[in-house]
Image (cartoon, grey):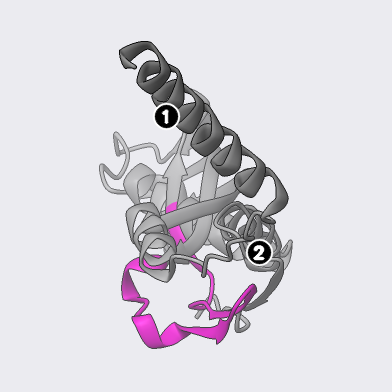
Amino acid sequence: MKKSLFFFLIGAVLTLTAFFLIKSWLQPKPEFRFGADRAAVIKQVEMLSRLETASFNIDKIIEAETNFDSLKQFLFGDKLLLIASGKVVAGLDLSTMKPQDFSGSGSVITVNLPAPQIFAVILDNSQTKVFDRNQGLFTKGDINLESEARQKAETSIREAACQCGILEEASKNAQQQLEVIFRSAGFKDVNIIIPKGSCN
């Protein structure tokens, strides 16, 4: 009696196990869909803050002199030739962005970015040197002339970078870099809008 009951229980357990195995095998597995995590994307953009996307290295020759007439220049004047080498860095300041700059649904997102701007003009002191200097007969030179020439060099290098299209380059590179970020976050259709920047 006990032996038959034991075999009955074993048979019942095996039957139930086989039933659930067959049921799980026949039942189709559900497919899950997940919406893109917008908060994570915004957080990634906020962490980038100032996104530097373009840098130009530019050399300029700056001629500076005291503003005297010919005789006074000969006696007390100062004139120099500065070879300046500098780097201009441009990009987008993403810290100004707000949640409403992101829109879309599902796998589609539209992002309105700020205009590109120049972040810095940095003179390379190791490469920026006075190439030639002529001083008047009765002077040791104007102590402020070289610093004024360096300031002029920074302005000229900035203007040259703008004329060479550094802001357009910054926009193009920013679009490429941010598309990678948004696509890695699960978006398939990424529309990035960047207004035209101004060097003024």
Residue 106 forms part of the magenta stretch: yes
Q: Observer-nearest residue: 100 or 84?
A: 100
The tag earlier along the polypeptide, 2 or 1, is: 1
Q: Secondary structure at mark 2?
A: helix
The amino acid type of the residue labelled 2 equals: Gln
Q: Return the x and y of residue 185 as percentages of the image width and height.
A: 54, 56
Q: Return the x and y of residue 17 as percentages of the image width and height.
A: 52, 33
Query: Which residue appears at 32% of the width and 39% of the height?
Result: 141
Query: Which residue appears at 39% of the width and 46% of the height?
Result: 75
Residue 119 forms part of the magenta stretch: yes
Q: Quadrant of residue 67?
A: bottom left
Q: Secondary structure at mark 1?
A: loop
User: Residue reaching furthest top?
Assistant: 3
The residue identified by callout 1 is 125
The amino acid type of the residue labelled 1 equals: Asn
The residue identified by callout 2 is 175
Q: Return the x and y of residue 190 as percentages of the image width and height.
A: 68, 71
Query: Which residue appears at 57% of the width and 83% of the height?
Result: 105
Total marks shown come to 2
Side (left or right) of 88 relative to 31: left
- Residues packed near mark 1 inside 10 Å, few (<14), some (14 to 19) or many (20 plus): few
Q: Observer-nearest residue: 40 or 139?
A: 40
Q: Which residues are magenta?
A: 94-120
